[in-house]
Amino acid sequence: MEIPELLAPAGSPRALKVALNAGADAVYLSGKDFGARHYAENFSRDELQEAIREAHLLDRKVYVTLNTLIKNSELPEVSEYLQDLYSMGADAVIIQDPALLVLRDELSIDIPFHASTQMTIHSRAGVEWAERMKIDRVILARELSFDEVQEIVRASGVEVEIFVHGAICYSYSGQCLLSSFIGGRSGNRGRCAQPCRKRYDLVQLHPSKRRISLDDGFLLSTADLSTYRRLDRIVDTGVAGLKIEGRMRSPEYVAVVVDVYRRALDEIKEGGWKPSSKEAERLMLTFNRKLSRGYLFGDDVMARDYPGDRGLPIGYVRGYSGQMLSIGLTSRTIPERGDGLFFEAIGKGLYLGEHSIRNRTLTLRAGPVPSGSRVYLTRRRSLKRFVEDLEKRPPLKVWDVEISFTVDSDGHVLLTGEVSVHGKVLRESVETEFERAIRRPLEPETIKKQILKSGYSPFRLILADFSYPGGLFAPLSELNRIRRELLSGLEEGIIDEMGSYPERNLKLPRKDKHGGRVSGDPCISACVESHEGMISALEAGAGRVYLEPQVHLNFRECDPGKLEGVLLKAERSASGYDAEFVWKWPDITHERVLERLLELEEELSLDVMVGGYGAAELLEDMDVRVYGSASLNIYNRLSADLMHDIFHMLTVSPELSHEDLRGLESDEILVHGNLTAMISRDNIWRVLLDDFRFPEGSRWGLRDGRGKIFPLNQLLNCETVVMNSAETCLIDFMPSLIDDGFRNFSADCRVQTPERTFKIVKSYVEAAESPDKIPSLKRSISDGSCGGITASHFTKGLRE
C-alpha cells in the first residue's frame, strides 16, 4: 500500500532535528525572509544549506517556503534567493506569488514548485491552472470537504497535499487582510498579529442598532485540526502529502505530533490499524485550541469560548475542604509530579507537587476552585524527556553501503564503497599502503571491525568482498582515516545526487496579452450588491459596475435560484447607460457553486469578474471579458503580466503603497470603500438561536474591544465576509495617480446604501474632472462614513 509523504514543520534548527528523528518524510521551513511565518526562529542561509544536507543524508526532503507576496522592489532579491535555493538543492519551493513562476522561467532553472495554501486553490479548476503553470504540487485550502478532496485528487494531473493537523485560520488562507488593516502587519507578508483570537461582539447595524448577547465572545477563534482518527480514510484518497501545521510551535509539539502520525501511517501500511485513545490523548498534551476534524469531515471548527491552549481534559473538581482539592479523573492519562494543571472556572493553573491518587481521585493542596470546574493537563514533564531523548537519538541507517577491501601482495590497499541512491549507483574509493609487519601483523578480524564501523552516520556497512594476504601492518588510525574518507565521499555524492533536478520543460504557456484600459479619460467603477445600488452608481457616472448579488434568505441560507432573475433585470437596466456591466462572481467558488455559475454564464454571456485561480480559464471559449478581483493578490508587475494572458483587467492588492503601485498602471486600484478583510467558510450567523428572527433588510457587524465595527457580508454559499471598519479613501491622491498613468479606479460600495453609493461615485467622478473640488468632496464623503476614512497602506505602507 502506498503511503503519503508526512510533512513536518521546522520553525527552527532544533525543530528540524526532532522532526527528522521522529520520522517525517519531509520538512518545510523558511529562510529569514519571504516566509509566511516571519516570527518563527527560521533559518539563515548557512543554516538552510546545512538543513538540506542533513535531511538529504537521511533520504528526506526539504521544502523551502517562499510563500509571501512580493513587491516590485523585491524582485531582484527574490530572484537571487531562488537561485540560491536551486544551488543548495532544495527539493521544492512553496510559493504564493505567481511572479515566481515568471522568475523561474526567466532564470531557466527547474526547481519544483508547490502552490501554497496561501494561493487559496479550492477547486479542480484551480488545480488545473496550477498544472498548466508547471506547478508540481498543490496544497489545497483547508476549507474543502473530504468528498471535494477526493474528487480533486481523482481528476488531478499534479500531486495534491492537504493539512491533517494544526492550527486553522478563520479566513481562507491568502484572503485575510484583517491584521493588515488593523495594525499594518500583513498575513500575506508573514506577519499576522492574529486579531481573530480577540473578543468581538455581534451587532445588528440596521434597521436598529443593538448588541446580540451570546455565551461566547471569541467569535472568530477556531479550534485546531486533528484528523488522526480518520487517517486511514485520508490515505485512501491518494493524496501525495499530509502536512502538519506548526512552524510557530515548540519542538515538543513537532516531536509528539510527528511521532503519532508516523506510527499510525506505518501501521496503516502494514494493515489492521485502529486509532488509539492513548495516542489521541498524546496529541492533546501538545498545544491545542481544542481539536476538530475540520471542514474535511464536517466538524464544527470553531472554539468561540476560549482562544488559548486547552491541553488534555483530565477531569473535574469534586470538592474543596481544608485547603485540599479533590479532582475526579476521567482520562486515561494520569497526572504526575511536575505536570501543569489548569482550572477552567478560575482561569488559573499550577504545577503538580505533592499529591495522592486513590480510586481515580486526585487530591492535592491548593487554593479554592468551584466544584464542577473542568481540569486540564497543560504540561507533561515526561514529554520534555521524550523530546530530549529524541534529540539524542542516532540517525537511522537508511543507506546500505557494500564495502570491498582488497590488499595486493605489495601492500597496496583499495577500499571501495557502493550505494544505490534511488536507482543510481554511487561508487567511492580510497587508497593507502600497508607495510610489511615486523612484530604484530594486522589480523583480518581487526581490519573488518575497523572498516565496518559506521558510528553516527546514516550508513549500514555490508562487507561484500575482502581480500587480505596477511603479514602486513598499519596503525588503526590509518584504517579509521580511510573509512572516514570513504564515507565522507559517499555523503557528498548522496547530497549531490539528492540535490539534482531532472531536466523538464518548464516553459510557461504564454499568450498575447489582453491588456486593460490604460489611455483616455479616467474610469470610476463601483462594486455593488443590489439593483438599487447599481442604478445609483450608474446615475453618478460610473463607467463600469461590478454586481455581486446578495441572494441570502435569512443569513443562514442562500438561494442561488434568484440569481438569473436579478442578473437579467440588472443587465437590462445597465444597457441604458454608457457603462460596462460586469457580473462579479464570489471570490470563493467551491465546485458545486462553480458549476451553477458556469451554467448561468452559458445562458447569459455576461462579462465576469472572478477572484480565484483557474476560474477565468473556464470562460476562455466564451466571447466575454474576464476581470480579476483583488482576491488574486496582484502585488507586482510580473504577476500582473502573467495574469493578463487571460484577464482583461486586474484589481491590484489594496496593501500596496503609492510607491509599490508603480509598474501596475494598466490595472485598477481600489480607491474607496470598506474593503474585504476576511473571507471565511464559517457562517457566523449560526451562533444565533434557530428561532432568531432577522429583521427585513438587516445589516450586521462585529465590534472589537476598541469599539470599531467591521461590517459583515455574505458570499453565494453563505460564507462570511468581514469588511474593514474604516473606509479606504484615496480621493486626495486622484490627481497624482492620474499623472502617474492610472486610469481605472474602483469604489467598493457593497455595504453602502444606494444614496451613499451615489455620493461616493459622484465624488470620485468630479475629483477626476475637477481636482480643485477635492477638499470639499472629501469632507462630504467623510461625513457619511460610519467608521471613519483612511488612506491605509497607500501612504504608510505595511509595518515591516
Image: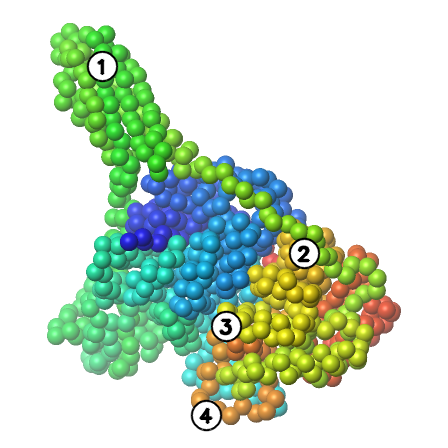
Q: Does residue 335 appear to the left or right of 667 in the view shown?
A: left
Residue located at (62% from left, 72% from top) = 602
**Residue bearing the label numbered 2:** 644
Question: Looking at the image, is mark 4 or mark 2 nearer the viewer?
Answer: 2
- Is residue 690 shown above or below 498? below
Q: Position of residue 575 (x, y in %)?
A: 77, 78
Q: Does residue 168 appear to the left or right of 785 in the view shown?
A: left
Return the disc, 3 or 4, that comes first in the chain's sequence.
3
Label 4 neighbourhood size at 10 Å, few (<14), some (14-19), many (20+)?
few
Q: Position of residue 708 (x, y in %)?
A: 59, 76
**Residue bearing the label numbered 4:** 691
Name the residue nearer the viewer: 131 or 81.
131
Q: Does residue 131 appear to the left or right of 286 in the view shown?
A: right
Disc 4 versus disc 1: distance between alpha carbons?
90 Å
Q: Does residue 16 appear to the left or right of 734 in the view shown?
A: left
Q: Amino acid at mark 1?
A: Val
Label 1 neighbourhood size at 10 Å, few (<14), some (14-19), many (20+)?
many
Q: Amino acid at mark 2?
A: His
**Residue bearing the label numbered 1:** 407
Return the disc, 4 or 1, that comes first in the chain's sequence.
1
Q: Are marks 2 and 3 in contact (CB under 8 Å)?
A: no
**Residue bearing the label numbered 3:** 592
Label 3 neighbourhood size at 10 Å, few (<14), some (14-19), many (20+)?
few
Q: Secondary structure at mark 2?
A: loop
Question: Looking at the image, is mark 1 or mark 3 nearer the viewer?
Answer: 3
